[in-house]
Image (tube, rainbow, N blue to C red):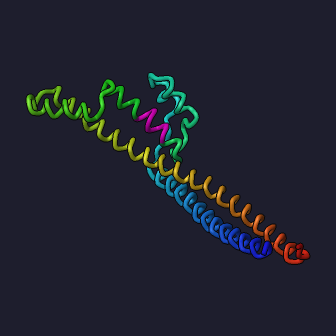
């Protein structure tokens, strides 16, 4: 009876190992696909990370420190995209709008356009509105790229875990078959 139970558990272990091998393969493919797509799409934009005076001109030291590791490099990965979006584009947006969001500036610009459509201040607000809209859009796209790069990284770690789990189940299944053979050859006890 013990031999049959060992064989049954070992076959289940082999099945789980096979499932984890397939999952590991798919997760590896997903990780590589996402990584390649993120890199390809970022490289196609031909963005160079700021360096030198462009970094030094930022008021916030945290922004400067976040950008320094990538200074002068082509923007090609999620970490660079996040730093560029959150510490370069956002810093410039905040400096030009005195910390106001696109929504706030847009509301002011539209109100000014109703009351004084030809005033120089209205034109200035409308230009700032357009600039903040473009900055917000670019930030969002870069942060989407960062999010996908993070998903690709997580898929890579999950693939490693799946392969380790598959190896563990394979070893346990082989040990189970070995024990089943020993149990089948053992003399019956009363």
Residue furthest front in the image: 190
- Image: 33 above or below 50: below
Q: Nearer the viewer, residue 170 or 87?
A: 170
- Image: 148 above or below 69: below
Reply yes or no: does residue 87 show up in magenta.
Answer: yes
> Residue 42, how many percent across, how many down?
47, 50
Q: Nearer the viewer, residue 186 or 20?
A: 186
Residue sitting at x 30%, y 28%: 100
Residue sitting at x 44%, y 35%: 86
Residue sitting at x 54%, y 28%: 65
Residue sitting at x 52%, y 29%: 52
Query: What is the quadrant of residue 182 in the picture?
Result: bottom right
Q: Main secondary structure of the magenta part?
A: helix
Left or right placement of residue 66 versus residue 21 in this view: left
Q: Nearer the viewer, residue 22 or 124?
A: 22
> Residue 146, how many percent across, how many down?
48, 46
Q: Nearer the viewer, residue 94 or 186?
A: 186
> Residue 105, how many percent across, how many down?
24, 31
Q: Read off the magenta span.
A: 82-89
- Image: 137 above or below 71: below
Query: What is the quadrant of residue 116 in the picture?
Result: top left
Left or right placement of residue 1 versus residue 162 in this view: right
Residue furthest left in the image: 115
Reply yes or no: does residue 84 show up in magenta.
Answer: yes
Q: Where the C terminus falls, by quadrant? A: bottom right
Q: Where the N terminus falls, by quadrant? A: bottom right
> Residue 51, how many percent across, how many down?
52, 33
Left or right placement of residue 69 versus residue 3 in this view: left
- Image: 144 above or below 56: below
């Amino acid at each position: 009876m013990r031999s049959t139970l060992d064989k049954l558990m070992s076959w289940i272990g082999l099945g789980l190992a096979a499932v984890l091998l397939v999952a590991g393969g798919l997760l590896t493919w997903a990780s590589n696909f996402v990584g390649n797509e993120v890199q390809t799409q970022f490289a196609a934009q031909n963005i160079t990370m700021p360096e030198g005076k462009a970094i030094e001109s930022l008021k916030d030291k945290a922004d400067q420190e976040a950008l320094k590791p990538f200074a002068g490099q082509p923007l090609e990965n999620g970490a660079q995209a996040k730093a560029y979006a959150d510490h370069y584009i956002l810093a410039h947006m905040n400096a030009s709008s005195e910390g106001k969001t696109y929504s706030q500036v847009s509301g002011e610009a539209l109100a000014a356009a109703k009351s004084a459509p030809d005033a120089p201040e209205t034109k200035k607000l409308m230009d700032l509105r357009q600039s903040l809209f473009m900055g917000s859009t670019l930030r969002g796209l870069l942060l989407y790229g960062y999010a996908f790069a993070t998903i690709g990284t997580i898929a890579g770690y999950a693939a490693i875990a799946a392969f380790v789990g598959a190896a563990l189940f394979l070893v346990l299944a082989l040990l189970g078959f070995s024990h089943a053979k020993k149990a089948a050859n053992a003399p019956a006890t009363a």
